[in-house]
Image: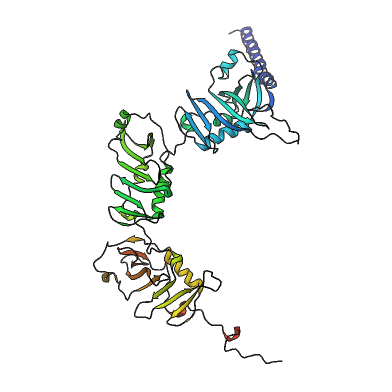
Amino acid sequence: MKQTQKNLVALLALTAAAAGLGLYAWYGVKEPDTREAERKQVSEQLFAAPEAGAKDEDGKAPPAPVFTKLTVKASGGTTELAREKDGTWRVTSPVSARAETAAVEAMTSTLASSKFSATVEEAPTDADLEKYGLKTPVFSVTATASVGSPAREHTVTLHGGIENTFDGSVYVRREGDPKVYAAPGAVRWSLDRDSFALRTKEFLGPLEEPSLQSIEVKAKANAYLLARDTGGTGWRLVKPVAERADEVKVADLLTALKEQRALSFPADSAEARQKLGLEAPVVDARFTPATGEPVRLRLSQVTEGGETKVYALREQGSQSLLGEVPESALAVLDVGVPELKDKRVLAFRREDVKRLVFHPGGGAEPIAVARVTGTDGGAGVWEVESPKQGKAQHFKVASVLGSLDTFKASAFGEAKPKSWAKYGISDASRGAVLQGADGKELARLWLGNEVKDKPGAVYARGSGPDVLEVSATWVELPAKVEDVLEAPPSPADGGPDATAAPTP
């Protein structure tokens, strides 16, 4: 290449570089500055009520809007919600269901408090709307609220577009207003919600324990019937055995059911129930309340495309609801008798106990204490009756009684043994007897031998018919009368043997 040609090539390269720098200066600096200048900063509420920013005659701001209706269009569907008289929200379309409280509160809070951050276009063209995702909105929310004082209804419809990938904001338009605004990205997160997101996932409950009278379960490994005690507070096992039931365990079962959250809500039909195995369920349970229709709950397990799924059908009267639930839901009600049986060692009411007789064992004399009502009609104090008489250590006796009330077995042993002696339990065993005001025995505890290979555990006999394994240190029963007898004042404290002070 000749020198003149080389010079020409170099000149052209320099010219191109200069042009590139010019274009960079325009598109990289000048044009963004121009666009930024066109984005007018604004601070206007999304839900702009006519009284926004106004003050009443006392100079106070108007009350916050109280939302009563919401219509949300997102993910190709429309969800309608209404506020109930008690303040809760309910999905009214496309289904009737309780609303997901957190999702609705996030939506109403965003509508009431969030503001546009900038005006992007004052008079957008169709091409502009297409660019911002607002020609066919990504989501729309129509919100009706009670505003102002005196209160009146006001409705606002917002349309959301695409996300600005530069700062995460979302393009928004308000119906009746031609402008395109920018709003914080959190606005899209709160408002762009489909029907599944807006309805509650806790559909197996509510099953309020105090209102139920019976619970019948047929599961894969276990079947049982629980019935309310005649007193109306506790529970008892009716089948497969007749035993006191663990009230805490029953309440925990119902809580665990309530906490199961739906993964999806398939369309319910006779064909769908058959296909999903609900006509031959793995778990079939019936909850009968004191008033109203029983609740039937069926759970099935099927394999779809190599994946195991669990479905639940909740029916009450004419209402039914089908949902997919986690696989762990199958095990919630499938529990055995040992888990359902009451693990309390003694069944009694603490306020009924008026007398305690402690048996130290080993042939030692029993220690009897009794509650004596005070002259003021109060709760009374404890006094030692035998083998000595005197005022008892009130806190000590109350502590022992409290320990006996909360004493629970760590495990169940032999059911209804023919011989208690092999467990070291007899009438001469260490233990305690609890009596009522009429001297009637309310409960009795016997403590026996240590449990083999379980340090710190001993065999026990309580209010039930079975051998129990309990902690040897849970309750400290008095071994001698001095353990509960209040010591008399010493001479230094002015006791009976103190030397009388001389008369001045």
Q: Residue at image x 38%, y 39%?
A: 326
In the displayed structure, would residue 7 be above or below residue 24?
above
- Looking at the image, residue 162 sits to the left or right of residue 45; the answer is left
Provide residue 330's location: percent of width, then percent of height.
34, 42
Q: Is residue 274 visible?
A: yes
Count of marks overlaid on the render = 0
* Residue at the spot 63% in from the left edge and 8% down from the top edge: 8
Vertical arrangement, residue 100 with respect to residue 482, above or below? above
- The reply to whether residue 321 is in sight is no
Say if 370 sits above or below 41 in the image: below
Q: Quadrant of the N terminus?
A: top right
Whether residue 438 sits left or right of residue 185 in the image: it is left
Which image quadrant is residue 147 in?
top right
Q: Position of residue 365 (x, y in %)?
A: 38, 81
| Left or right position of 399 against 43 | left
- Say if 356 sits above or below 8 in the image: below
Residue 54 is situated, as x and y percent measured from the top left of the image, at 72, 30
